[in-house]
Amino acid sequence: MLQFILKRLGLALLVALTVSIISFSLLFLSGDPASAIGGETATDQDIEAIRVLYGFDRPLVVQYWDWLSSALTGDLGESYYFKLPVASLIADRLQITMILGVCGISFALLTAVPLGVAAAIRPNSFIDRLALFLSVAGQAMPSFWFGLILIVVFAIQLGWLPPSGASSPVHFIMPTIVLGYYAMPAIMRLTRAGMLDVLSSDYIRTARAKGASEGRVLFKHALRNAIIPVVSLAAVQMGFMLGGSIVVESIFALHGAGYLAWESIARNDLPTVQALILVFSLFYIIFTFLSDVLNAWLDPRMRAG
Amino acid sequence: MADMATDPLLADITGPTPGQMLRKRIFGHQGLLIGAVVLGVLVLVAIFAPWLAPHDPYAQSLMARMQPPVFLGGSWEHPLGTDHLGRDYLSRLIYGARVSLLIGTVAALISGVIGTAMGVAAGYFGGRVDAVVTFLINVRLAMPVVLVALAVVAIMGGSLQVVIVVLGLLLWDRFAVVMRSSTLQVRGREYVAAARAVGCSTPRILMSEIMPNIVNNLIVVVTLEMAHAILLEAALSFLGLGVQPPTPSWGLMVSEGKNMMLFEPWMVMIPGVVLFVLVLAINLMGDGLRDVTAPENRS
């Protein structure tokens, strides 16, 4: 087990390192970052001064090493736009995104798992078909459009919910639904497939033969085993979700890290964008690592892989 | 089948051929048929856009701004109304089909070539090649797609070509994953060993033994990634960092309509519905193809 964890940890670190190289090189994709900072009105001398000031005149490897080693100590550079340390900027905004991510994944699990179980208990029933339809339709629904529809219906027409902002828990209802529904189809399909698989197994027949009640069979015996892969899928989806929060936060004007990313991209604030790509990637890497370890802990057969 | 089962030999001879069974599965699959018909219609609309569109999608008319669609009391002159610049909404929708389908097709093609090459190589050669490809897939999955795509498009400048290339370079992961596992499945089959035994070259084994046997899985991924690329383009354009105005992109139309959402919600609804229908049709077709070509993989 320890060996498995160490191996996965090494892999995760290597992935993180590679992502850091990619997000660093993004800065140089534009050609000359100095002229990008200087803007259209900058003279050649200005640009040269900027180049020296920001250290763009040094070799790339040296710049990368500099960036990485300060990133490791928590210094992610200074935002071109806010003139503030990027690290504290992101830390400020991350809270909203984390709340949104946790709410989103909880919403997805709380709706998709019961639906998947219900669908598996009676395959090809109305509920099974409804679940299948919802999962197919859910995958085709553009999230930004779904968000706008919710705003039109619940904020404008009915006036039940606030259209934007983050000042109270009520403000998070619509963003949670929009962020969460995207993970639902996958979770539901996996729950359904897992339950179908488990329900036809021998130990379920044994449990039924012993005279255990149907509820006990379903929840105590079946769901417990079927839920294992769902938990790891949820961890991976959570990583994806944080990255996807950029769309949701921009629709509902939630000033989280995703919104910051959108603003920073529009303002050409590259240090912030670089750092955000790195932070979101790290979240994904951490979540998949945790899910791998969890899986291996729950199911020793996974440790070989 | 019951009476045929009495004589298995006879059933073998007189039973339906694999081709007939495939055809039967295709025409018996509702989702696949509906998806294919809807997608076919939208492709035709995109191809014949110049003949179908009642107006020039770029022609502005300040006298005829924000006219409502016919079903909300508008005139037949502009069946789906006009936008904030007086451009005919129906014509823009029709031309928008071109943008979405072009992006979906070309991006899926680019990512398909990259992902298939990586996946097949990893599955067939195994060992170090596999380790490197698996690592690259992990790296790619760790990067937030929307964020990276937005950033690159912002740096390179938003245009149709840039969006297509960026999405093509980002969406190869599922191709690589699926092609790798499909190749692993067929690598050990007798016909591959036979081809190797008669001295076929590796490229020839890959092209004429491995590829034909995994191509049905490839087609399924192509459809899913097409849908993915179309949704992402719409999202990028909606955020203002994808296809730039005045190009008629559905995502952009939703974004332009957003400002008028309070009084004219149809401006957001119409392009969104069309986008939803297109992606739904592609997904239905992809799911259907998976069911039909590999019934044993049905979840």
Image (cartoon, rainbow, N blue to C red):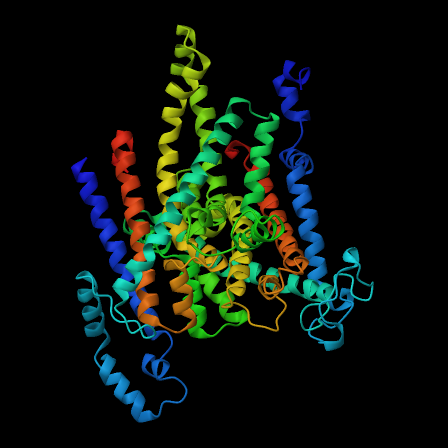
Q: Position of residue B249 (x, y in %)?
A: 61, 65
In the rendered image, the vertical position of residue B191 relative to residue A13, given as above or below: above
Question: Horizontally, is B212 left or right of A242 in the view?
Answer: right
Residue B61 at least partly seen = no
Which residue occupies the foreground of this view, A286 or A167? Answer: A167
* Residue placed most toward the observer, A131 or A301: A131
Residue A190 found in image quarter: top left
Residue A292's x, y, as percent? Answer: 29, 40
Residue B267 in sight from this viewpoint: yes
Q: Residue furthest right?
A: B76
Q: Residue B47, relative to residue A204: is it above or below? A: below
Q: Quadrant of residue A66?
A: bottom left
Q: Residue at x 41, y 61 (%)?
A: A259
B164 to the left or right of B64 = left
Q: With respect to residue A187, does A198 lie above or below?
A: above
Quarter of the N terminus of chain B within the rendering: top right
Nearest the eye: A37 or A25: A37
Dividing the picture into quadrants, the one containing residue B189 is top left
- Looking at the image, the residue that sits furthest to the top is A210
Q: Position of residue B180 (x, y in %)?
A: 40, 46
For image coordinates 63% across by 52% down, the residue present is B278
The residue positioned 61% from the left and 18% from the top of the image is B8
| Residue B275 image position (x, y, % from top left) | 62, 55
